[in-house]
Amino acid sequence: MNTQPIVENRIWQPEAECLPRPQLRALQASRLREAVSRCASVPFYREHFARLGISPDQIRSVEDVRRLPLTTKADLRAHYPLGFLAVPRDAVARYQGTSGTTGKPTWVAYTRRDVDHWSDLCARFLVAGGLRPEHTVQIAFGFGLFTGGFGLHYGIERVGAAIIPLSSGNSERQLMSMQDMRPEILICTPSYALKLMDTILNGDVPRDSLALEHAHFGGEPWTEDMRERIERGLGIRCWNNYGLAEVQGPGVSGECAFRNGMHIQEDHFLFETIDPETLEPLPDGEKGELVVTALCREAFPVIRYRTRDIGIIYADGDCPCGRTTRRMSRILGRTDDMLIIRGVNVFPSQIETALMRVEAVAPHYMIEVSRPKALDEVTVHIEMQPGLFSDSMRELQSVRDAIGSAIFSVTGLHMHINLVSPNTLERFEGKARRVKDTRRLVD
């Protein structure tokens, strides 16, 4: 555990974030009862509660959450568009949504009180990660249905900092704003930060023309090794946070000044870890699928939502920052992103971890999975660092061997390594798409 804070240790709502654990557990139990009561007006939950013989007065402790039904993305889609709405339409202050495989969004809704809570929860992790009222923040998240842009906007406003709401894309404009307006904080996906970093490191935008100090990343999984690459390349501090639209958006958890995991906002969210195959609960400290219950949502209450995100919830323990909430790991992968290669479960994040340990490679890669004959084959296309791409077969083979060994040490699999010249692979302005699995086209 880190013993020194990365920035000054600040807490936005100490009365909530530092609540003694016995009081926090009692608050969670009370809010869980209230959530079950609100959900009774939602047909999906009403039918399940009736079948299971559950009523709000039977919820007496946090552990009783395991008596409640799990909720999946498929359930939300089956009740499209607003089958989970728990308030009258005239009580809704905002609708947002996520894109789906059907081409229609999964809609979520917020009352005015939901938006107020959302603002404070985003303010919590932003303040913990260095945001101060005198700062200027450039938001390079989309401001459409995607919850990231608006959620962070609300949190920054709550703190009192200035906002440059540029939205996503248009890298030339983003960099011009960073030079001219000199924001101290950038908010975007980690893959988009890599795209901007390329331009800066290539000398097109002098680093000393920027005032950037911090970046808050979200929207996609990223590894600790990727954080180190970006921090070293840009000379900034990068912060991790977690959220998903189905239970709120950003602000569900975030790092404190010590960066020893992300503090879960446990006064608003109840977390569990389950085995994604058996659905049995797992103890703190074991890797599994995260399940989240939104304790305070009025418009769109969700109970035991299966996130499909794989992570670890750390056991109760004191954090030097003073917060009493449990912490969670960064997202280690998704159950629906997991690749099964010759019977071995592999997450793209594992491959990224291995790649970032080889200094000669740039943080840009593509994973291609195919089945040319009877066995699966994986080819990892990786860019070399500028100035390190060599014509020497011996040097290139040495880099391939280093990458192959690093991947094998993490995954236990041998993969084909294809080294490509700098600025060859696709860059991403939104969420990165780093896997091309052609097996699904022929199965």
Image (tube, grey):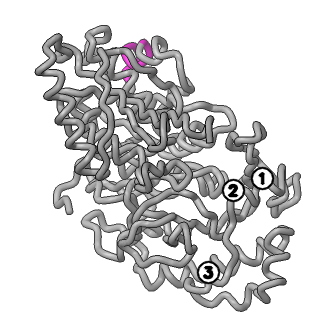
| In front of the other: 315 or 431 | 431
Q: Nearer the viewer, mark 1 or mark 3?
A: 1
Residue found 31% across the figure and 23% down from its top: 383
- Between circles 2 and 3, the one closer to the viewer is 2
Residue at 42% in and 12% down: 176
Pointer 1 or 3: first along the chain: 3
The answer to whether mark 2 and mark 1 are in CB contact below 8 A is yes
Q: What amino acid is labelled 1 in the image?
A: Arg
Q: Position of residue 193 (x, y in %)?
A: 39, 28
Disc ID at residue 216: none
Quadrant position of residue 58: bottom right
Check disc 2 and give the amino acid type. Answer: Lys
Numbered mark located on residue 77 in the image? 1
Look at 38% across and 46% down and name the residue there: 349
Q: Quadrant of the C terminus?
A: top right
- Alpha-carbon neighbours of circle 2 within 10 Å: few (<14), some, or many (≥20)? some
Q: Residue at x 32, y 33 (%)?
A: 416
